Amino acid sequence: MRRILAFILTAAMLLAGGIMARAEEGQEKALSSMTAERPDADRIQAMFDAYIAENDLQKELIAVGYADAETGAAWYWNEDKQFYSASLYKVPLMMMLAEKISSGELEADSEIYGMTIPYIESEVLTYSNNDIAYSMLQWFGEPSSVRLQFGRYTSLPEEYFDWGFSAYSNFTARFMTEVMLTLFRDPDRFPDIAECLKEAQPGHYFRRNLEGSGVEIAQKYGSYHDDMDGSDWNHTAGIFYTEHPFVLTVMTRYGGISEIILGDLAERFLAYSESAEEPPAASP
């Protein structure tokens, strides 16, 4: 009799556990589905289209990535179109250096080429020092091979990083958006990187229309003029530390008006983020 009772009790506990596990799994899936819907693609597209029309811009010269930093849900425009990265490459490059500190391979006060790591990070990220950045790229190895290592800061497959990416430093809005998401989500792995970016370019780029607003933005710009064909590359990737933090990447091939575009889109995506409805709470 005791054996029968024990068997019944065990079966009941297993059944209850299975029901609870399935309920929890269902709640997780439901919550995932709801949070993944936080970016309203139709609303964002309408906002973007209106801005393009109002300013008579060419959509093919702009790429955008917007992602909810908490859920990872994203909206993109021309997300896989390659643009010359200019100084955007300095973010994943310095993430590689910071990673060596968090892993214990280097100490925070280690020196490279006679420069301390905090000095290198500040010069490269806050002040966009090209000479130091390139010397660090070479310190890590052959530049095209080093660029391929940047892919580990994203979920993108190996084949995504083609010859244009590795040899010519042609990045995409999807790539930079995922890099900035990784930086936001794992700050202990990349000590001091975001702090350096929070000090970069006050009053310019994503901060152009938002300086004094109280919104904290970790941003990196990239700007390059090609004397050969006269083309201009102007980009910014950033983390907006708001109540609902988000990542924004805007890449352009515009000239003198590019910073206006970058500032305007930052302002509009901030307004969208602040007005987006909260996802409903999961059922108890």
Image (cartoon, helix red, strand yellow):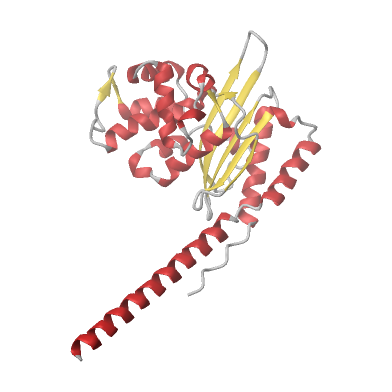
Horizontal side of 147 relative to 53 (left or right) equals left
Residue 249 in picture, x, y percent from top left: 58, 36
Location of residue 235 (image quadrant)? top right
Residue plotted at (38% across, 15% down) = 142
Q: Quadrant of the N terminus?
A: bottom left
Asked if residue 204 can be seen in this view, the reply is no
Instruction: Looking at this view, name the residue that lies furthest to the bottom.
Output: 1
Q: Is 5 placed above or below 245 here?
A: below
In this rendering, the answer to whether 228 lies above or below 106 is: above
Decide: is 58 above or below 264.
Answer: above
How far from the left and from the top, in percent, is residue 26?
48, 67
Direction left: furthest residue = 2
Residue at image point 38% right, 44% down: 186
The quadrant where residue 194 appears = top left
- State the image coordinates of residue 121 (x, y, percent, origin top left): 38, 29
- Viewer-nearest residue: 155 or 244: 155
Q: Residue at x 49, y 16 (%)?
A: 167
The answer to whether 238 is drawn above or below residue 221 in the figure is: below
For the point 56% across and 46% down, the residue is 67
- Left or right: where 36 falls relative to 2: right
Q: Is residue 270 left or right of residue 5?
A: right
